[in-house]
Amino acid sequence: MAVLSERWEDNAAGKYYVDKNCIMCDVCCDIAPELFTESEDGDHHILAKQPSTMSEEEAVRDAMDQCPVEAIGDDGLD
């Protein structure tokens, strides 16, 4: 499970995030390339854009479910 205190600072502001457990497996980018991208440092993925539609919200949830190291989190706040 992703840990809010381990959230990468370069994630888009908002409730969803990628934490420091990311292994750059590309699952999130394959599922939702409009939301996830490689960081500028090239050593982790980030949530580049918070979801703004139901389909984007579903895509983030799908990425969370499929992330092999559970590095995608939801801080629980709206």
Image (tube, grey):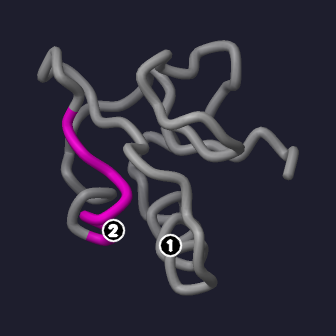
Quarter of the view holding residue 20:
top left
Gap between marks 2 and 1 measured at Cα: 9 Å
Which region of the structure is painted magenta? 31-38
Quarter of the view holding residue 54:
bottom right
Q: Which mark is residue 23?
A: none
Q: Is residue 4 above or below residue 58?
A: above
Cβ–Cβ below 8 Å for labels 2 and 1? yes
Q: Is residue 66 above or below residue 2?
A: below
Callout 2 amino acid: Ala
Callout 1 amino acid: Asp
Q: Where does the image place residue 9, in percent across and percent down from the top left?
A: 49, 16
Which residue is found at the position 33% from the left and 68% from the top? 32
34 drawn magenta? yes
Q: Which mark is residue 62?
A: 1
Q: Is residue 58 above or below residue 23?
A: below
Q: Where does the image place residue 13, in percent across and percent down from the top left?
A: 60, 34
Which residue is found at the position 54% from the left and 54% from the top? 50
Looking at this rendering, what residue extends furthest in the bottom direction? 55
Quarter of the view holding residue 21:
top left
